[in-house]
Image (spheres, rainbow, N blue to C red):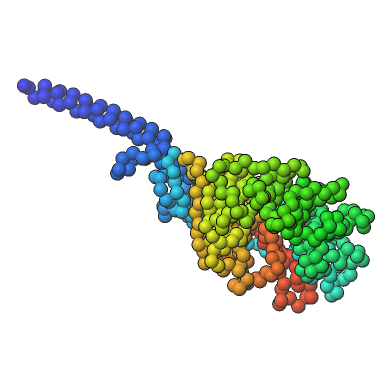
């Protein structure tokens, strides 16, 4: 065979081989692309289905550095795809905020959403008042502060009960309203607020108040919007015939749920009508309310009932639900779930889905989050964080409990509507925040002692209002309200 023919055949062979290689590479690339777009990933053990993480960071900042298993990802990438199933570590570093880190479990073919709240390294502290505050009360959502000024060193015109709106009222300016005097020094109703042991429960309209005085064993309804003294101040003891040991606003703040050791009554403020919700002379009532509905347990009938609009109906529970010997019942503030203790064992019950799970064999509840999915327990004088999660695959419930080194006497509690935890660590003169499972504990305020629970977060967690006494201040007006701004977003409003 001639050399020219050999060269031609060799060239044809090489061309054919090149075409095969190109086609093979194209098909392989296409297959790999399809695998990745369908949530798969090629590993040494074969092809596996992967999951994703969606990050929702508040506040968002271009300087935030995100790491997945110690490998930095793009700063603008908030949806991380093709993550192999299993436990992974997400970490966020910043020059402006405290670092954040969490271990999460990734499930195949699912997107796990992480809501991250970052707190500034140097939060802004602003003084709100210039006076001497004797007592301080907050509305439930943290939007208003009510404070008593009755120090003789303060000008008479500045003494009385004051109300201050804490949340920003304008869209483009971070500005609070001026303090509003509710009761002046000359008003005799001011005396109801001077007893050192009183508790004040403010309704959701931020108008009416319940003044609970355990020393005098009285509960007083106070409505500063009324001009008539008889309508302004109502002795609740006289209306229901006994001293209520527990009181709650109810029915759009038009009623009050009152109880003692044998009876629960709904008292309607508008028409003075009284409705017996439950009567059990031999056992102390077991109940809880979110202000809209009321759940009660009857040991005589061994049932849990829902009470609303003056009507009670028995709750239909799963046949295997542990209904016997219930000695504690808690309702999540969003009304989504109840937590009961039956024979010393705690159970979580999701009302809409009718699912339940055992959450603890022992202990006492310190606090419950707004949605009921996070609980802080005191178990043998140790703070234990318990989180209830729903499986992304079969929607089943699971429980994760994490013991902590936090002193149980510090009484950690959840921040308003979030699952973040606030710790008033007064021995160390600091306020700390952690995740709902006790992780990521950071100091947001140092060298400050806050007694009597005189602090409150706004509902969205963007700021903390607290009363601080400045012992170094030569001015006599040294007990004042301060606002610690924790949301440093560049936007002119809270996210």
x, y percentage for residue 83? Answer: 41, 44
Residue at x-position 91% and y-position 64%: 187
Q: Residue furthest right?
A: 228
Assign the N terminus to one quadrant of the image: top left
Question: In the picture provided, is 300 more to the left or to the right than 361?
Answer: right
* Rendered image quadrant of residue 312: top right
Question: In the picture provided, is 135 more to the left or to the right than 417?
Answer: right
* Residue 143 seen by the camera: no
Residue at x-position 85% and y-position 55%: 239
Q: Nearer the viewer, residue 478 or 256?
A: 256
Above or below, 46 relative to 489 = above
x, y percentage for residue 444? Answer: 60, 64
x, y percentage for residue 415? Answer: 64, 57
Residue at x-position 73% and y-position 59%: 261
Question: In the picture provided, is 382 more to the left or to the right than 249?
Answer: left
Residue at x-position 70% and y-position 55%: 285
């Amino acid at each position: 065979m001639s050399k020219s023919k050999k060269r031609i055949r060799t060239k044809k062979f090489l061309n054919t081989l090149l075409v095969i290689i190109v086609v093979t590479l194209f098909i392989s690339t296409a297959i790999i692309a399809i695998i990745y777009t369908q949530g798969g990933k090629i590993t040494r053990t074969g092809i596996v289905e992967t999951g994703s993480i969606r990050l929702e960071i508040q506040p968002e900042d271009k300087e935030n550095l995100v790491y997945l298993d110690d490998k930095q990802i793009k700063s603008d990438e908030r949806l991380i795809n093709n993550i192999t199933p299993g436990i992974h570590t997400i970490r966020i570093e910043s020059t402006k905020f405290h670092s954040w880190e969490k271990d999460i479990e990734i499930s195949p073919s699912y997107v796990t959403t992480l809501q991250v709240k970052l707190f500034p390294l140097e939060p802004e502290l602003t003084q709100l008042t210039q006076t001497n505050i004797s007592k301080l009360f907050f509305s439930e959502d943290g939007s208003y502060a009510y404070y008593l000024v009755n120090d003789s060193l303060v000008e008479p015109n500045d003494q009385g009960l004051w109300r201050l709106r804490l949340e920003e009222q304008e869209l483009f300016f971070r500005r609070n309203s001026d303090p509003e005097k509710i009761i002046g020094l000359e008003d005799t109703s001011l005396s109801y607020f001077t007893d050192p042991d009183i508790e004040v429960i403010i309704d959701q309209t931020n108008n009416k108040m319940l003044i609970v005085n355990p020393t005098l064993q009285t509960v007083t309804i106070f409505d500063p919007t009324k001009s008539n003294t008889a309508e302004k101040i109502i002795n609740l003891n006289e209306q229901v015939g006994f001293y209520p040991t527990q009181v709650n606003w109810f029915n759009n703040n038009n009623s009050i749920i009152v109880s003692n050791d044998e009876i629960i009554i709904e008292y309607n403020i508008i028409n003075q009508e009284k409705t017996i919700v439950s009567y059990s002379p031999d056992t102390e009532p077991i109940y809880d309310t979110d202000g809209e509905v009321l759940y009660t347990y009857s040991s005589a009938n061994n049932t849990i009932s829902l009470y609303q609009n003056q009507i009670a109906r028995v709750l239909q529970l799963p046949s295997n639900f542990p209904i016997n010997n219930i000695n504690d019942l808690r309702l999540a503030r969003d009304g989504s779930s109840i937590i009961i203790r039956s024979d010393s064992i705690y159970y979580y019950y999701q009302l809409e889905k009718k699912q339940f799970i055992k959450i603890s064999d022992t202990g006492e509840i310190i606090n419950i989050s707004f949605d009921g999915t996070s609980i802080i327990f005191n178990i043998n004088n140790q703070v234990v964080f318990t989180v209830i999660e729903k499986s992304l695959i079969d929607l089943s419930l699971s429980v994760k409990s994490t013991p902590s080194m936090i002193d149980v006497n510090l009484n950690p509690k959840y921040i308003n509507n979030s699952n973040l935890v606030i710790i008033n660590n007064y021995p160390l003169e600091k306020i700390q925040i952690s995740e709902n499972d006790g992780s990521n504990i950071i100091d947001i305020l140092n060298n400050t002692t806050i007694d009597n629970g005189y602090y409150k977060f706004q509902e969205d967690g963007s700021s903390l209002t607290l009363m601080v006494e400045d012992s170094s201040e030569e001015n006599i007006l040294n007990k004042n309200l301060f606002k610690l701004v924790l949301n440093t977003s560049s936007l002119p409003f809270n996210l």
